[in-house]
Image (tube, grey):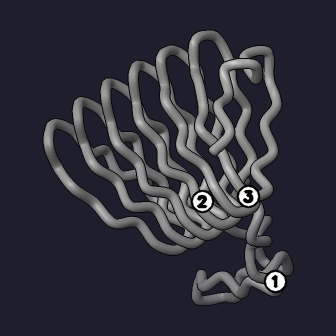
């Protein structure tokens, strides 16, 4: 497409683009953070994180965490966690957790858990548990 073709499509004579509408929220992506080794991180807002090798993550608001290799995640509010490889997840409020491998999930409040393979959970007070490994659940 040539510059002349853009004239009349939101680009003025100086080459500046005038955007009429903001990008819809569901089409935006936040930057992803990679956390490894024994690092400790707090995530807020719409942050995304990939955690490996005994990292400790505290996820608040609408944060998303992918946890592997013995990572520990404390998830609060509406955070979403996907965990595998012996991770330990502590879920509070309205957190959603997808767990597989040898992951352990400790959940309370209105958390939602989906258990696969050898994952297991300890749950209390209104936690919803689904998935093929849901029988690996202990109620407190």
Category of crowding for the residue at label 1, using alpha-carbon neighbours closer than 10 angstroms: few (below 14), some (14–19), many (at least 20): few
Quadrant housing residue 114? top right
How many numbered marks, from 0 up?
3
SS of the residue under disc 1: loop
Quadrant housing residue 99? top right
Residue pictured at 75% horizontal, 19% vertical: 135
Question: Does label 3 or label 1 sit earlier along the sequence?
Answer: 1
SS of the residue under disc 3: loop
Q: CA distance from mark 3 to mark 2?
A: 18 Å
SS of the residue under disc 2: loop
Q: CA distance from mark 2 to mark 1?
A: 28 Å
Residue pictured at 56% horizontal, 44% vertical: 81
**Residue beneath label 2, please?**
79
Task: State whether residue 82 is above or below residue 33.
Answer: above
Q: What is the x, y in percent for residue 73?
A: 41, 48
**Residue beneath label 3, please?**
125
Question: Does label 2 or label 1 sit earlier along the sequence?
Answer: 1
Q: Nearer the viewer, mark 3 or mark 1?
A: 3
Q: What is the x, y in percent for residue 40?
A: 21, 56
Q: Residue furthest top?
A: 117
The image's mark for residue 21 is 1
Left or right of residue 70: residue 127 = right
Q: Nearer the viewer, mark 2 or mark 1?
A: 2
Category of crowding for the residue at label 2, using alpha-carbon neighbours closer than 10 angstroms: few (below 14), some (14–19), many (at least 20): many
Category of crowding for the residue at label 3, using alpha-carbon neighbours closer than 10 angstroms: few (below 14), some (14–19), many (at least 20): few
Q: What is the x, y in percent for residue 62?
A: 61, 66
Left or right of residue 116: residue 46 = left
């Amino acid at each position: 497409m040539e510059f002349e073709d853009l004239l009349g499509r939101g680009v003025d004579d100086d080459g500046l683009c005038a955007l009429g509408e903001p990008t819809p929220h569901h089409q935006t992506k936040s930057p992803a953070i990679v956390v490894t080794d024994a690092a400790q991180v707090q995530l807020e807002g719409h942050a995304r994180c990939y955690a490996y090798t005994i990292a400790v993550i505290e996820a608040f608001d609408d944060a998303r965490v992918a946890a592997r290799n013995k990572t520990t995640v404390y998830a609060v509010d509406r955070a979403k966690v996907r965990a595998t490889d012996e991770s330990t997840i502590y879920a509070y409020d309205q957190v959603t957790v997808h767990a597989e491998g040898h992951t352990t999930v400790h959940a309370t409040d209105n958390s939602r858990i989906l258990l696969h393979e050898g994952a297991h959970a300890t749950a209390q007070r209104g936690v919803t548990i689904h998935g093929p490994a849901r029988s690996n659940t202990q109620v407190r």
